[in-house]
Image: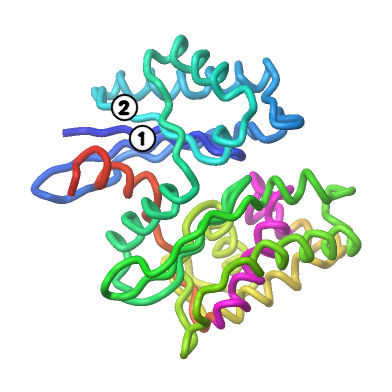
Amino acid sequence: MLYTVIDVGSNSIRMTIFRYENNQLTMLINKKSTAGLASYVSEGVMDELGIQKCCDEVQSFANLSRNLDSTNISIIATASLRNLVNLDSVQKALENAVGARAEVLTGQEEARLDYVGVTHHLSHQNGVIVDIGGASTELVKFDPSGIQSLISLPIGSLSLYNEYSSDLFPTSKDRKAMKARVEQELAQIQWPLPEAPVTLCGVGGTARAFFKICREFYGIPKPQREVDAGYISLVNKKLKSRDFRVQQGVYRATPDRVFAIMPGMLILNQVSKKFLADRFALSQAGIREGYILDRVLHC
């Protein structure tokens, strides 16, 4: 049986088609459109161009899914839609265009489904999951007994860029303002500090972009999915450079995230420091896998 999830994010819209057979969930197709929906939002309202862009992209993915005989289609949205003042208008437009209503997940539910997806993919028994999206960041502390704590913070790679950046690559002043905001948000987390360094389990575009930059600048092999957490600090420092050759390398590695990678890495760096991370592991599975397993298949 085939299942499709269309995930409407602040920066990108993704369609993933899975096959579930013999109790195994296998990804067959994973496609992305860099829609940049956050850029169409002002004072919490998505304008008509943004709504049309959202509908066009989701409809295109839904049509492709049906053409591939995957008709079990779920449309989910996170901070890209849940913070909108005109959410109802966007929902109605999507339903008229696609014939299905998008399920807008709360931040808490997004974090929980991240945990379901990550623990399905990775073998780590302890750690902190970090999912840095365009407009929110989800954190989940877990151990062998399950979730210990979770939170969704209203900061993301695109939202920080849009709010604080005054240049294509944020200036030193911009970065200081971003860092202060990130520290302010992280300060509200009053979880007990880990007794020993933990593994950060990364989900989402910033985590994937981090590994691409590690491959570009530090020769990390492409199949490698876990590194010393010290690379997070190294990449964060690298991104501060105004050297054209460095900026060119960043663009080669992550052309679709050239605007958002610095704010995203700033968040990741501060999270790594807060939780005393010693390792960083990239999970290939996340919210879409978690949604299928938990909400569709009820595994």
SS type, badge 2: strand
What's the residue type where badge 1 is placed?
Val
Residue at 12% in and 50% down:
23
Q: Which mark is residue 5?
A: 1
Q: Nearer the viewer, residue 21 or 287?
A: 287
**Chief secondary structure of the magenta span?**
helix
Residue at 60% in and 16% down:
52
The quadrant in which the N terminus is found is top left
Span highlighted in magenta in the image: 249-276
Position of residue 259 in the picture relative to residue 37 (left or right): right
Q: Which residue is mark 2?
A: 73
Q: Position of residue 63 (x, y in %)?
A: 38, 18
Position of residue 140 in the picture relative to residue 297 (left or right): right
Does the magenta portion include 262?
Answer: yes
Please tell me whether residue 83 is drawn above or below residue 124 in the rendered image.
above
Does the magenta portion include 298?
Answer: no
What's the residue type where badge 2 is placed?
Ile
> How much space separates mark 1 and mark 2, taking CA atoms?
6 Å
Q: Position of residue 62 (x, y in %)?
A: 39, 22
Residue at 81% in and 62% down:
245
Location of residue 223 by image quarter = bottom left
Q: Position of residue 14 (x, y in %)?
A: 47, 37
Please tell me whether residue 205 is drawn above or below residue 61 in the rendered image.
below
Q: Position of residue 274 (x, y in %)?
A: 61, 77
Location of residue 47 by image quarter = top right
Give yes or no for contact between labels 1 and 2 (Cβ–Cβ under 8 Å): yes
Mark 1 Cα within 10 Å, few/some/many (few <14, many 20+)? many
> Which of pointers 1 and 2 lies earlier in the amino acid sequence?
1
Q: Which mark is residue 108?
A: none
